[in-house]
Image (tube, rainbow, N blue to C red):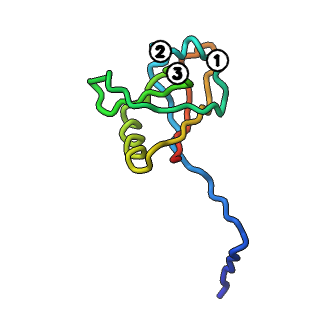
């Protein structure tokens, strides 16, 4: 029988996992004005948006003070639970469209703290 010896001196690094998703409603907000300024790995933030009364727990995503768009409703619920449980989440821009349509959507990574 083989055993695995684990030393206390070895640091184990686990990958930071998160949720990869995209933003919706990019054409309706500030994204059209700042899309050229956004870069991969820019830090974004999420805020609750109570003005969307038809969608409970609506979460808007911002770059500095500019509203980019919203999380889609199915991811909204999951992220809201993460925020309620852990306090806050980290949001990172992972991909923006480079093709002929800059409004196809931008991909973001949402991680716990």
Find residue 67 and report its horizontal and vertical position in percent.
49, 20
Q: Secondary structure at mark 3?
A: loop
Q: Residues within 10 Å of mark 1 (few under 14, many from 20)?
A: few
Q: Can you tell which quarter of the image residue 90 is in?
A: top right
Q: Can you tell which quarter of the image residue 12 is in?
A: bottom right
Q: Is residue 61 above or below residue 12?
A: above
Q: Label 3: which residue?
A: 65
Q: Nearer the viewer, residue 27 or 8?
A: 8
Nearest-to-viewer mark from 2 and 3? 3
2 sits to left or right of 80: right
Nearest-to-viewer mark from 2 and 1? 2
Residue 99 tag number: 1
Q: Quadrant of the N terminus?
A: bottom right
Does the CB distance between marks 2 and 1 fall below 8 Å? no
Q: Residue furthest bottom?
A: 1
Q: Earlier in the sequence, mark 2 or mark 3?
A: 2
Residue 29 tag number: 2
């Amino acid at each position: 029988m083989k055993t695995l010896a684990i030393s206390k001196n070895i640091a184990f690094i686990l990958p930071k996992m998160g949720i990869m998703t995209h933003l919706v409603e990019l054409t309706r907000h500030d994204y059209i004005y700042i899309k050229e300024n956004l870069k991969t790995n820019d830090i974004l933030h999420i805020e609750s948006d109570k003005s969307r009364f038809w969608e409970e727990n609506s979460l808007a995503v911002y770059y500095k003070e500019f509203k980019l768009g919203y999380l889609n409703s199915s991811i909204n619920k999951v992220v809201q639970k993460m925020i309620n449980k852990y306090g806050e989440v980290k949001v990172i821009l992972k991909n923006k469209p480079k093709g002929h349509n800059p409004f196809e959507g931008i991909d973001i990574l949402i991680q716990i703290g």
